[in-house]
Image (tube, helix red, strand yellow):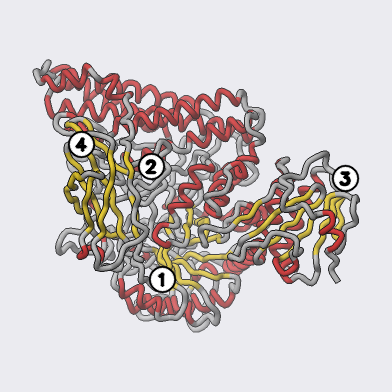
Amino acid sequence: MFHRRSFLRRSAAAAATPALMGAAPSRAFLVIDPADPLTRAKPVQWAVSELESALRAKGYKIRRVRQAKPGDGLSVLICGSRSLPKASPPVPTEPESFLLIGAPDGIIVCGADTRGLMYAVLELADRVRYGAVLGAPAVHRPANPVRSVMRQFVSELYDKPWYYDRAMWPQYLGMLAASRFNRFDLTFGLGYDALKNVADPYFVFTYPFLMAVPGYDVKVTNLSDAERDRNLAALRFISEQTVAHGLDFQLGLWMHGYQWLDTPNAKYVVTGLSKDNHAAYCRDALTALLKALPAVSSVGLRIHGESGVAEGSYDFWNAVFQGVGRCGRTVEIDLHAKGIDDTMTANALATGMPVNIAPKFAAEHIGLPYHQADIRPSEIPAAGQIGKGLMGLSEGQRSFTRYGYADLMRDDRKYTVRTRVFYGTQRILASGGAEAAAAYGRAFQFCGMTGGELLEPLTYRGRRGSSVPGSRRSGYISAKLEPKYDWQKYEYWYRSFGRMLFSPESNPEECKRSFGPAGASARHIEDALAAASRILPLVTHAISESAACDLYWPEIDWGIPLASEAPKMFWDTPSPRIFQNVTALDPQMFSSCSEFAGELLGERSGKYAPTEVAMRLDAFVRTARADLTAAGDAKSVDAMRLAIDIEIQALLGTFFAEKLRTGVLYALYERSGDRRALSNSLKHYGLARAAWASIVDRAKGIYAADLSISDRTTERGQWADRLKGIDDDIAALNAKLATASPGKDPRIESIVNSLDDLFTHVRPPLPCKHTPPAAFAPGQPVDLTIAVREGLTRASLWYRHVNQAERWTSADMNSSYDGWRAGIPAATTNSPYPLQYYFEFRAAPDRAWLYPGFDDGLLNQPYFVLRRA
């Protein structure tokens, strides 16, 4: 029988004692009740072994006991809630929750379930490892039910080594679990979006690379049975290790096309399939695969035309869904949202399996930590619009499903929604930061979302046959900078995202302890990294040359020019396709350079201007550089890697800030022909060019000459390849300068004379007082009042349903004794959708605001959301 009394005597002050102080005792007793079902679970046993390793590394001698003796050393009671001493605070009951409390020489770690207890034990191990106060009380509940990481197999050259590496997987999955992710998604078939020129077809059509399906003579040329069997054995090992480390395993199958077009010399070709047996084979293959892989609990499917199957092929997808339904257990069907419609959703639900729909968070990038207020005009279907080829829906009347939550957020939905964050913005350079990760964690709960999935760093390296023989997946030239496993460079990215998605309101210091105490050199590295990591998401959100990750890569920007049009492949930049016309990813909140130039010559809107974005970038750059200087010279290879990437990101911040200023001034020149605007534009372009040249110098000898993540021109090479395009654009502007007229527009003269103020002045926030209603009643109007301590000339209420298929409506507000008033009409509230709204105010032609707008850290949602009562 498990005896608790002696432990209770020693831990009587547990709830009141904030810390376990003093020198570390030489012995540690792990008090474990063998009758507790939670302590017998494999993930908990693994976590206990991690705690033991951490304690041994600190000099403890460890014993596992049923009862600890007073004064013998450090006692740790590891238990589920049923074994928790009665004198202790109650453990939370929510799944995955945990409690950690301490007394002067005893600690209790307790979980609500297996995963919660695993997290509790791993938290104590983390404190031991990084010298934190062991007994500091902690009660944690998960805010996001699903916290997933997706790793993709897209390159035979780069990805086979890690796929087969049985020594790597326990370390990688253990890191994910310690970071409090609870799902791992291993995805195949994303190497291609169209099956033309398939230079690297390994695992693209996945089933025959893993198994022979009885009743079908489907094979892959040049793939031996032994290698096929090895592939399945590796996948079984990975999935079982995932579950053993306390995570759910999702299998992603994103390509169901099987014919390589315009690929005469493909090494691997699928044989034995035709249109007559394709659907039945996929159904039976998926059933067989799920039976062979019992650890799989979710299957991810891309169901739009890039899957190789024409949109509207409901019979085909019904067969695939049946393949899940026939496996003999509950397996979630996770549908990628692009091209989704009610028929597809209903068919998936008809299987009786749980269904999730995963929309993209900020197109195919990582933007600011909120769901964009609107999608761009190019993503909104025109009347009668029909897509081409396989893309009849997602490029037709369902085009608004491509890059956001679309029309999925009905309050009466029978499926779950969790967002998916693509990584088109940044793939090579390290990033991470607790405060920003917490903001994403709050955004992933938007209108009842159940969390999110993050595509990890290095996503798409070598995609579409762009791998380079002899090069590393990490991109490093020097073996000195290469970590043992490439993901180890990004451990703080995983740590900060995983922990803060689990609990966005938790103390960020829990994340940062891995860098040492505040004020330490390594902590300055963390501060610098956190600031530098804010740069590219802001760039993406404010200047989106394309929503597609295989066109726009801000980290190594191809650079749409100012003086001449970009190629037609930049289909979602307005024509003419020049930098100053590039719209924001969220055009409801941000203005383009051309749009803002028009405002400077007329009336300002409340939107955030490119010049304000530039100032925010400058601030992130200053913070990153100051903290990097405070950190001093890198004292380890880990610190050196981070310092290099921080420097490059800071230079990228300067480049984009100056190019935004360039774009505004050049747009003014285009509207006026005034030489002064063009001359000043060239001045700032020169500063941008100097920053880019510094990036080239800093990356030389560090990063390989080809960091490709696609076969497209914009996704090939690295920073040095972009200088010529910048120089050509500057030369074209200089040619225009030679013939530009002095200009006579007094407005241009006024703007040029006040450039210092324009480029450094931050709009002060507008003092407002507004209390959003707690909820709304369907079919009843919503009256809104806001008090403003400012003389205004006009006030507007902007509102719509939380439905990106709709456009925003603007209503004039009326001034009253207690503020400004307007209402959302009953016809709008009579809907299954939540509502969203914000205010726009004007006080003069050059003074305007949005409310709530953004806070100083750009970490909030810039609009209000109302749910139904």
* CB contact under 8 Å: marks 1 and 2: no
Q: Which residue is mark 3?
A: 26
Q: In the rendered image, which quarter contains the N terminus?
A: bottom right
**Does the residue at mark 3 contact the one at mark 4 (Cβ under 8 Å)?**
no
Q: Quadrant of the C terminus?
A: bottom left
Classify mark 2: residues with Cα within 10 Å, few (<14), some (14-19) or many (20+). many
- Give the spatial CA distance, label 3 vs label 4: 69 Å
Tell me whether the residue at label 1 lies in contact with that at label 3, contact meaning CB atoms closer than 8 angstroms: no
Circle 4 sits in a helix, a strand or a loop, which is it? loop
Residue 553, numbered label? 2
Task: State the residue position of label 4.
Answer: 792
Q: What element does badge 1 sit on?
A: loop
Q: In this rendered view, identify the residue nearer to me: 718 or 371.
A: 371
Mark nearer the N terminus (1 vs 4) = 1
Name the mark nearer the viewer: 2 or 4. 4
Residue 736, position as x, y percentages in the image = 17, 22
Q: Amino acid at mark 3?
A: Ser
Q: CA distance from mark 1 to mark 4?
A: 45 Å
Q: Amino acid at mark 4?
A: Leu
Q: Gap in Å between the C-alphas at discs 2 and 3?
A: 53 Å
Q: Residue at x 67, y 57 (%)?
A: 99
Q: Is residue 518 left or right of residue 536?
A: right
Nearer the N terminus, badge 1 or badge 2?
1
The residue at the point 45 percent across, 29 percent down is 650
Residue at image location 10% in from the left, 18% down from the top: 743
Query: How many residues crowd around disc 4 within 10 Å: few (fewer than 14), some, or many (20 or more)?
Result: some
Residue 408, image x, y percentages: 34, 65
Quarter of the rendering containing residue 615: top left
Q: Earlier in the sequence, mark 2 or mark 3?
A: 3
Image coordinates of residue 488 in percent, x first then y, are 61, 45
Label 1 amino acid? Tyr
